[in-house]
Image (cartoon, rainbow, N blue to C red):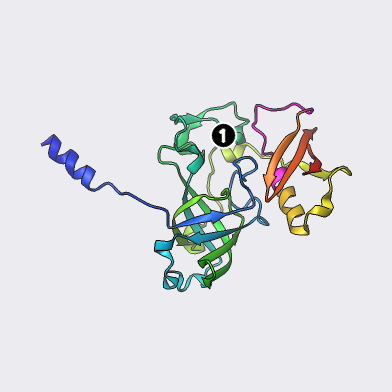
């Protein structure tokens, strides 16, 4: 009897494959926003895998301003997983249950993000693509499903949010020092880098004011340090 039940459960298990891949200026995990919408000027593109390039699959999507993306933490597949994690919102020193957080270290490596739709191009040279802003995905991230965001059902603005309510996140002030060649960047790049650095991408066990960090962005290496609540961009290489 137990074997029959196990066989039935195994038969009903779902296997999934990427329907698309995400393209972003952020080519490493360092600097990825901790939540979608934080860096609303950060642009990205959803490009569909060959088997899912039917233009009609996007019919009607242009009428929605936001979508949900179900995607994979592809860089964490082989990482050790634990039932508790240390949320950055709590300073990285307090453990919470993994299912009470949005930690990227999850049993099934699945992420969920709400992003703003800029354009739905059903017949681009690369096949169907969706251009979005505000995503918290790195370049090359596999996407497993897309669903429209429905504010009537998906928005709950006045509800409890656990430890997030009790721990206010203070953004960093961001300045570009004269040594940073800001002429290499567009106005949108400047705004986007400012939003990314303001959320302090450093590991929270790092606090040395002398340490210089590098954040890959497009083809640039943004070098910065953090002193007294201010991220100072030293150079753009």
Q: Compared with residue 171, is residue 65 higher up or lower down, i.e. above or below?
A: below
- For label 1, the SS is loop
Give neighbour class at mark 1: few <14, some 14-19, many 20+ (Cα, 10 Å).
many
Toward the left, the furthest residue is 1
Looking at the image, which residue is at 21% across and 47% down? 11
Q: Compared with residue 81, is residue 50 higher up or lower down, i.e. above or below?
A: below
Residue 212 on image: x %, y %: 76, 32
Looking at the image, which residue is at 44% across and 31% down? 81
Residue 7 on image: x %, y %: 17, 41
**Residue 217 appears left or right of 135:** right
Is residue 207 inside the magenta stretch? yes
Residue 78 on image: x %, y %: 45, 34
Which residue is at the front of the view, 159 or 175?
Answer: 175
Residue 150 on image: x %, y %: 49, 63
Quadrant for the C terminus in the image = top right
Q: Main secondary structure of the magenta part?
A: loop
Which residue is at the front of the view, 153 or 46?
Answer: 46
**Residue 41 appears left or right of 120:** right
Q: Is residue 17 visible?
A: yes
Is residue 158 inside the magenta stretch? no
Quadrant for the N terminus in the image = top left
Find the magenta span and give its range: 196-210
Looking at the image, which residue is at 77% across and 35% down? 225
Toward the right, the furthest residue is 178
Res. 86 image quadrant? top right
Res. 107 image quadrant? top left
What residue is disc 1 on? 87
Tally the numbered discs. 1
Q: Is residue 229 visible?
A: no
């Amino acid at each position: 009897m137990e074997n029959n039940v196990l066989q039935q459960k195994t038969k009903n298990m779902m296997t999934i494959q990427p329907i698309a891949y995400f393209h972003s200026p952020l080519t490493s995990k360092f600097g990825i926003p901790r939540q979608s919408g934080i860096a609303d000027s950060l642009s990205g593109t959803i490009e569909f895998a060959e088997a899912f390039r039917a233009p009609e699959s996007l019919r009607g999507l242009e009428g929605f301003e936001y979508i949900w993306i179900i995607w994979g933490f592809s860089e964490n597949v082989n990482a050790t997983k634990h039932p508790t994690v240390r949320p950055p919102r709590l300073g990285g020193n307090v453990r919470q249950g993994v299912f009470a957080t949005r930690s990227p270290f999850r049993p099934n490596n699945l992420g969920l993000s709400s992003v703003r739709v800029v354009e739905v191009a059903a017949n681009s040279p690369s096949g169907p693509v969706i251009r979005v802003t505000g995503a918290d995905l790195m370049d090359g991230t596999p996407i497993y499903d897309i669903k429209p965001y429905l504010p009537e059902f998906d928005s709950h603005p006045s509800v409890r949010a656990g430890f997030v309510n009790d721990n206010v996140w203070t953004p960093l002030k961001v300045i570009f020092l004269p040594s940073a060649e800001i002429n290499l960047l567009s106005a949108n790049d400047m705004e986007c880098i400012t939003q990314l650095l303001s959320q302090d991408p450093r590991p929270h066990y790092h606090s040395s004011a002398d340490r210089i960090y590098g954040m890959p962005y497009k083809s640039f290496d943004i070098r910065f340090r953090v002193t007294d609540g201010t991220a100072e961009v030293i150079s753009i290489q």
